[in-house]
Amino acid sequence: MVKRGGARVRVYPDTAAANAPLLKFERDARREEIGLWRAVEYRIPYASDLPKAYEGFQLVRGQVSGMRGAEGFGAVCDLSLQNSALRLQIQTAAASLCQEALGLGVLARGYVRGDEMEISHPLNFELVEAPTN
């Protein structure tokens, strides 16, 4: 299903081992623009271009511009994205990302509530080229 562009991959810490191979299939389907990746609604926006009402499971591109301690349950840090109110709330299972990502371009996947996206596992966070905007 993922290989044909019929679904997005959502990774949880307890399912990560089974999800890892699916990320390559999703990446290939996005690049080839097949299935849902053909639709405008599923194009991955830059964090700097997000509308105010942006919730639910999402994929977002951006450049990490800052890091601070987090207050949420199970969170170890919040990463800021350049020119965006969206913060990536890094959970314990993905704690290594707090120190590794500063200044880098990323593709993040997770559930968005308000202005926070929960990053529950390192597979929800992919290093990519920095945005040019």
Image (cartoon, helix red, strand yellow):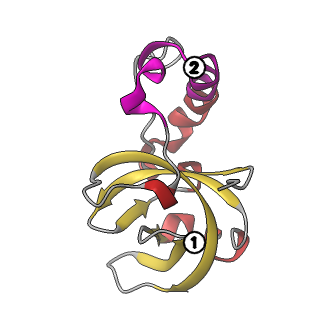
Helix, strand or loop under label 2: helix
Residue in view at x 38 percent, y 75 percent: 74
Disc 1 target residue: 95
Picture quadrant where residue 27 is located: top right
Picture quadrant where residue 23 is located: top right
| Quadrant position of the N terminus in the picture | top left
Residue 2 rendering spot, x and y as whole percentages = 48, 20
Q: Taken as a whole, is the magenta stretch helix, strand or loop?
A: helix
How many marks on residues?
2
- Name above or below for residue 50 compared with residue 115: above
Disc 2 target residue: 29
Q: Nearer the viewer, residue 21 or 113?
A: 113
Is 108 in the magenta? no
Residue 69 rendering spot, x and y as whole percentages = 49, 88
| 43 on left or right of 115 | right
Q: Mark 2: which amino acid?
A: Ala
Residue in view at x 39 percent, y 62 percent: 117
Residue in view at x 45 percent, y 44 percent: 11
Residue range highlighted in magenta: 25-43
Q: Label 1 to label 2, Cα distance in Å?
A: 29 Å
- Which comes sooner in the sequence, label 1 or label 2? 2
